[in-house]
Image (tube, helix red, strand yellow):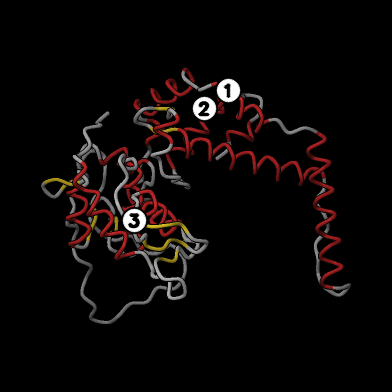
């Protein structure tokens, strides 16, 4: 597995890109994450890079901005850049033949005489498909070591496992490197992580009863607030309450992997975990959670569901 990441000279380029492409916040100044994943992670990256302070709406520039002594993880920052570039339509992924996929839903609007989309300027390589990137993104991808001679580099492949484009139809779960990482994760689970897993997957009848009571109380509160003519659904049944608790279990297990596990290195020791960004909706971490939990708790299929 390629791990020869580039030297740290890319940090200034990442800061410049994030600062210029995150949406501004007219009320508080700085940047507004708009509750969108790409913007939230971009704001988090600026905070981790010592350039901003977190706010309830995103982030604001720090007056004493300076890089931390230890930079955030390179792979996490790569994901933040790729997500923001795609969100801002500065990076688009193409089908294997280089064409743009047709929309699968919603309206299709065509302009008569419109020029065709530009051809890909990033070639397929190392298990990754073609793409088109704006000039500023091309230069940043080169600085990050993800692009060389117009093609994706070897180290770019597993970065994309974390946020794979649908256009490329990637299947990393069948890759021997993923299988090896599953075995490593199982063999090296820290005691505190395993204890937390045991706690999360345990859903008792008392937990279900408490959830039913909370649902009933919420319904009564809504009826008192909105009156008898408002349409308010019935409280959860025990079956519905259990399914809700199982879903929350999946989310909390995902967060264990988002915060404490990476393909390069496996489980993060505490000082490494502090350098990790909380990259949620991480496709690779979710797949690892499913694989590991399936092996650890074979009688609890809900905990390994994706």
Q: Residue at x 56, y 28 (%)?
A: 293
Q: Earlier in the sequence, mark 3 or mark 1?
A: 3
Q: Is residue 293 above or below residue 78?
A: above
Give SS at disc 1.
Answer: helix
Question: Would you identify the image quadrant in which residue 83 lies?
Answer: bottom left
In this view of the protein, can residue 124 be seen by the observer? no
Q: Residue furthest front?
A: 64
The residue that disc 1 covers is 296
Q: Nearer the viewer, residue 19 or 100?
A: 19
Q: Residue furthest bottom?
A: 112
Q: Where does the N terminus fall, quadrant-wise?
A: top left
Would you say the residues marked 2 and 1 are in contact, meaning their CB atoms lie under 8 Å apart?
Answer: yes
Give SS at disc 2.
Answer: helix
The residue that disc 2 covers is 292
Give SS at disc 3.
Answer: loop
- Locate residue 294 relative to residue 223 in the image: left or right: left
Q: Residues within 10 Å of mark 1 (few under 14, many from 20)?
A: some
The residue that disc 3 covers is 51
Residue 48, image x and y in percent?
38, 48
- Locate residue 106 relative to residue 227 in the image: left or right: left
Residue 258, image x and y in percent?
47, 40
Q: Where does the C terminus fall, quadrant-wise?
A: top right
Marks 3 and 2 sit apart, C-alpha to C-alpha, by 36 Å
Q: Earlier in the sequence, mark 3 or mark 2?
A: 3
């Amino acid at each position: 597995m390629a791990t020869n990441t580039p030297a740290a000279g890319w940090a200034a380029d990442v800061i410049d890109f994030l600062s210029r492409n995150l949406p501004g916040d007219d009320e508080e100044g700085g940047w507004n994450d708009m509750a969108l994943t790409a913007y939230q992670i971009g704001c988090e990256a600026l905070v981790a890079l010592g350039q901003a302070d977190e706010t309830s709406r995103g982030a604001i520039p720090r007056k004493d901005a300076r890089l931390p002594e230890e930079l955030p993880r390179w792979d996490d920052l790569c994901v933040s850049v790729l997500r923001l570039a795609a969100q801002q339509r500065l990076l688009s992924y193409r089908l294997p033949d280089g064409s743009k996929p047709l929309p699968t839903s919603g309206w299709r609007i065509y302009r008569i005489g419109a020029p065709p989309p530009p051809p890909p300027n990033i070639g397929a390589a190392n298990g990754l498909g073609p793409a088109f990137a704006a000039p500023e993104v091309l230069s940043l991808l080169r600085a990050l070591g993800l692009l060389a001679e117009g093609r994706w580099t070897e180290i770019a492949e597993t970065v994309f496992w974390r946020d794979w484009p649908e256009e490329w139809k990637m299947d990393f779960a069948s890759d021997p490197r993923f299988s090896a990482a599953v075995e490593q994760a199982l063999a090296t689970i820290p005691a505190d992580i395993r204890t937390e897993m045991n706690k999360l997957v345990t859903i008792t009848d008392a937990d279900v009863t408490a959830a039913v009571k909370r649902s009933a109380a919420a319904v009564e509160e809504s009826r008192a607030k909105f009156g008898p003519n408002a349409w308010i659904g019935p409280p959860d049944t025990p079956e519905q309450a259990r399914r809700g608790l199982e879903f929350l279990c999946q989310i909390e297990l995902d967060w264990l992997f988002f915060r404490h596990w990476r393909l390069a290195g496996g489980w993060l020791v505490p000082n490494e975990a502090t350098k990790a960004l909380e990259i949620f909706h991480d496709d690779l971490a979710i797949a690892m959670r499913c694989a590991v939990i399936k092996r650890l708790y074979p009688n609890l299929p809900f905990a390994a569901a994706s």
